[in-house]
Image: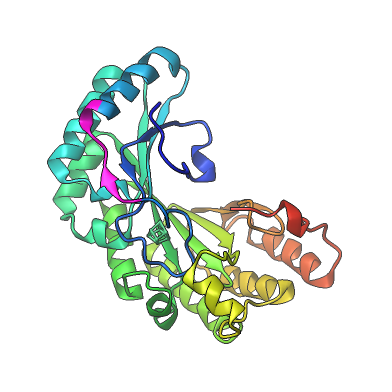
Amino acid sequence: MHYEGHIIRPPSEANAIILQVTTGCSHNRCTFCGAYREQKFRIKDDAVVDSDLDFAANYCTRQKTVFLADGDALVIPQQRLLDLFARIKEKLPWVRRISLYANCRDILNRSPEELAELKAAGLGRIYMGLESGHTKTLATIKKGATSAEMILAGRRVKEAGIFLSVTCLLGIAGIRYSLQHAADTAAVLNKIQPSQIAVLTLMLLDNTELGQTAAAGSFQLPDKLGLFQELRTLIVRLKVPRCQFQANHASNYFTLDGRLPRDKDNFLATIDEAIAGTLDLKPETLRGL
Ligand code: SF4
């Protein structure tokens, strides 16, 4: 496979064929994100992607899903994406689902009909980074969208019948807005009603604007107790009728993995153990992105 740079995929795509159709992220401005800092964004040539599809046709016959990397493959123009889906179907007929990361702007650039067309062509899952429902925080971290736009984008994906996974980031609002961030994020998620919520914990990186702001003393990440209270507030306020909830990323201090509302009480009991200091936490050295 012709992989360039770091290949990043959601935990749920661990068994997918990773087809890199773009490099980097067309936005690449979020202050906390170091994923593609050094990577120049481009859509990869069809010939290179086709040769990877040929490789997958020979060697990936047991993998039933395809994940399109990198950071926002939905930026690819509609017809080109439909052509790509048709080639995936032709060369990998056993594949059941195609998934990708999409940012809010790329979703809103699609009409509901265009999203439905992508769904019919094989797009089964979209991962959207919300990070926070707190509008001031979204502006500060340069996410490129307001909470109202996030709600619109999330609902549009759901209305097209596409499984929507939304990512939230503990700690991203700092100490100052921590609990407001948790409450506003829950409010946005309650309006979107995503199929899956994935919670990560902020790790400050030296090569990011936020990492440098923190080093200069202008941003304070909540301590562990603060992060656990934030997570608790988020879960208490979530009102989702049927939703997978996962905090199983390498950046988290402990794992929550289940369904809401079914597992809400269990989740809260685990968080309360973490707050009380009776839960085994992942050592700092084992946390990662
Ligand atoms: S968080 Fe996502 S949208 Fe923001 S720069 Fe990183 S990859 Fe791009």
Q: Residue at x 31, y 61 (%)?
A: 27
Relative to 245, 232 lies left or right: right
Determine if the magenta segment contains residue 46: yes
Determine if the magenta segment contains residue 175: no
Relative to 157, 169 lies left or right: right
Who is closer to the viewer here, 106 or 287?
287
Who is closer to the viewer here, 116 or 42?
42
Furthest residue in direction right, as rendered:
278
Is residue 149 visible in the rendered image? The answer is: yes
Q: Is residue 96 above or below residue 37?
A: above
Ligand 1 quarter of the rendering = bottom left
Q: Residue at x 42, y 54 (%)?
A: 38
Residue 152: percent from the left, percent from the top? 27, 66
* Location of the N terminus (image quadrant): top left
Residue 114: percent from the left, percent from the top? 16, 48
Residue 284: percent from the left, percent from the top? 75, 59
Q: Quadrant of residue 112?
A: bottom left
Is residue 172 visible in the rendered image? The answer is: no
The stretch in magenta equals 40-47
Residue 88: percent from the left, percent from the top? 28, 26
Q: Quadrant of residue 285?
A: bottom right
Who is closer to the viewer here, 36 or 137?
36
